[in-house]
Image (spheres, helix red, strand yellow):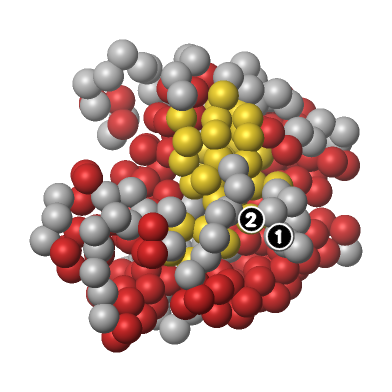
Amino acid sequence: ADLSHIPTKSSTTGSLPSPVSWPPKHNGGLEEALTGADVVVIPAGVPRKPGMTRDDLFNTNASIVQTLVEGCAKFCPDAIIAIISNPVNSTVPIAAEVLKKHGVYNPKKLVGVTTLDVCRANTFVANSQGWDPKDVDVTVIGGHAGITILPLFSRVDGAKFSDEELEAITVRTQFGGDEVVAAKAGAGSATLSMAYAGFIFTENVLKAMRGEEVTQCAFVESDLTEAEFFASPVKFGKDGVEDVLPLGELSAYEKGWFDKMLPELKKQIQKGVDFVNK
């Protein structure tokens, strides 16, 4: 009901899980929601509380994502699937393994949403430089958790930082989620900013499906690094991921973070793969 009050040309419907019945049957509500879908956005899961990392959410959210992606494999195998549920570094590999088991995996149609990292980086840079955030577009690579998040501030034209400022704004971008979790004091994690970021990402995917040129950062299957999945600028087209763009040169400072990030990212990806194949 809440979403249906927003004035757009779209219509909003909801589907509940099927009631328990005998003999058992599959989840008719999930089938109803997914059948015919072109894009599926999955934000489902439990939020973080103070002291928790995204990885602490793993056991609960991993099962939720697995169930929903199994539904996608059955009822909308050609849909673009955008994963928001944390830990994204692990839930995207979980989705990939589920889709592989059903024989419908298409790397062009599975993406992890890292747009919130870009939103935070844009906001923090704009605030530090006295700019309008709409004029800033920071490239953020890696993953979507802690030190795996690497904003490339060296590529922001005109921005000037001392070494201390660069360190502070980098770490704040990496751990911006912790700032929200602490402020909410146990009442949840980022919701409004994540909803905005999810809207921006999904709208861009839909624009690309309509034939517009769209490039945005996303966590996708990639051969740019040793990690099977990696967030970087991606060109989207009518069928999802069209091209994973080259990383380009990193500054010495960024290279230091990159070298620290990659082993952690690979470990989190493997955790997702192992969850499905245990």
Horizontally, residue 5 falls left or right of residue 141, namely left
* Quadrant (top left/top right/bottom left/bottom right) for the N terminus: top left
Q: How many marks?
A: 2
Position of residue 161 relative to residue 227, above or below, is: below
From the top left corner, tell me how far across and down residue 212 is, in percent: 45, 19
From the top left corner, tell me how far across and down residue 247 is, in percent: 58, 53
**Looking at the picture, which amino acid does disc 1 mark?**
Thr
**Looking at the picture, which amino acid does disc 2 mark?**
Phe
Horizontally, residue 155 falls left or right of residue 242, namely left
* Quadrant (top left/top right/bottom left/bottom right) for the C terminus: bottom right
Q: Residues within 10 Å of mark 1 (few under 14, many from 20)?
A: few
Position of residue 154 relative to residue 157, above or below, is: below
The residue at 58%/19% (across/down) is 238
Question: Residue 173 or 28: which is nearer the viewer?
Answer: 173
From the top left corner, tell me how far across and down residue 239 is, in percent: 63, 22
Position of residue 55 relative to residue 11, above or below, is: below
The residues bearing labels 2 and 1 have C-alpha atoms spaced at a distance of 8 Å
Quarter assignment of residue 168: bottom left
Nearer the observer: mark 2 or 1; the answer is 1
Question: Residue 243 or 89: which is nearer the viewer?
Answer: 243
From the top left corner, tell me how far across and down residue 80 is, in percent: 61, 30
Question: Which residue does the numbered mark 1 point to in the structure image?
Answer: 225
The residue at 32%/77% (across/down) is 166
The residue at 30%/25% (across/down) is 4
Q: Are marks 2 and 1 in contact (CB under 8 Å)?
A: yes
The residue at 85%/36% (across/down) is 102
Question: Residue 180 or 121: which is nearer the viewer?
Answer: 121
Q: Secondary structure at mark 2?
A: strand
One can see residue 99 in this view: yes
Q: Secondary structure at mark 1?
A: loop
- Counting residues from the N terminus, which is met first, the one under dot 2 or under dot 1? 1
Question: Which residue does the numbered mark 2 point to in the structure image?
Answer: 230
